[in-house]
Image (tube, rainbow, N blue to C red):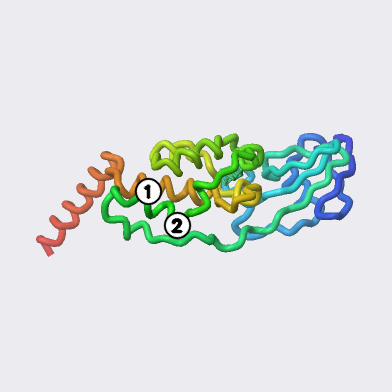
Amino acid sequence: MEGAVEFDLTINGQCAQAHAGMTVVEAAWRNGVPRVRGVGCLEGVCGSCRILLRHDGEVTVALACQTFVQPGMEVVFLPPQSAPRHHYDIDEFEDSWSIQSRFHEIFPEAARCRHCHGCVVSCPKGIKVEEAIMLAATGRFRDAGEMFFECVMCELCDNACPEQIAPAHVGLFCRRITAHFHLRPPNLIHRLEELRQSKQGRGSHD
Ligand code: SF4
Ligand code: SF4
């Protein structure tokens, strides 16, 4: 921006310059932090630009694309999460009676939430993560899944959880299992059926 007043901040331990109105990710790119393929939606939907922030004596986490720079801010980009620790195949769920017992086998830590609020404080999307974990742990998977609707899988809640519950992955499980046991949207079913019939019609004329 022409004429904008520049100020200093720190990005990944290096001195950087930016001006008001820039997001942290814009400032990072401008100061030579490399762009990584597949990272950088700039709209808070890819969940990749996880940062640790120190400013005015407070330490927080956030998404760099949603955070505006401020003078003196210290920013560290967090590395990607390691591979998920909880494994399951959603197609192995044949009936809904077994969901809760399987859930506790897959996510045994979920029942041990200590209500520290770490996940809630960390979530850049304002999701009531702690409440959603309680719902999942008591078998209310559809309700829990709906609470994770805005989740961008940044996994900042997973980093914050002292019980290693992996709330982001509990949320994903809840959404997957709800979809697995529910009818797909009727307009989509109808359209797929139209396509199937038209394909069949074409096949009979070949
Ligand atoms: S619920 Fe967890 S993974 Fe999802 S947006 Fe919030 S902090 Fe990120
Ligand atoms: S961070 Fe973990 S232990 Fe703390 S409230 Fe959230 S789910 Fe529970």
Q: Residue at x 68, y 49 (%)?
A: 50
Q: Say which quarter of the image contains residue 202.
A: bottom left
Q: Position of residue 200 (x, y in %)?
A: 15, 57
Quadrant of the frame with the N terminus: top right
The answer to whether residue 124 is seen in the rendering is no
Q: Position of residue 136 (x, y in %)?
A: 44, 43
Quadrant of the frame with the C terminus: bottom left
| Real-space CA distance between mark 1 and mark 2, rounded to the nearest whole angstrom | 10 Å
Q: Disc 2 marks which amino acid?
A: Ile
- Residue 47 horizontal side relative to residue 172, left or right: right
Other residues around mark 2 within 10 Å, as few (<14) / some (14–19) / many (≥20): some
Mark identifier at residue 63:
none
Q: Say which quarter of the image contains residue 34.
A: bottom right
SS at mark 2 in the image: helix
77 relative to 114, above or below = below
The answer to whether residue 76 is seen in the rendering is yes
Mark identifier at residue 106:
2
N-terminal of the two: label 1 or label 2?
A: 1
Q: Residue at x 51, y 48 (%)?
A: 110
Answer with the quadrant where ligand 2 appears in the image: top right
Q: Disc 1 marks which amino acid?
A: Gln
Q: Residue at x 78, y 42 (%)?
A: 59
- Residue 173 horizontal side relative to residue 84, left or right: left
Q: Which residue is disc 1 drawn over? A: 100
Q: Position of residue 170 (x, y in %)?
A: 49, 49
The number of callouts visible is: 2
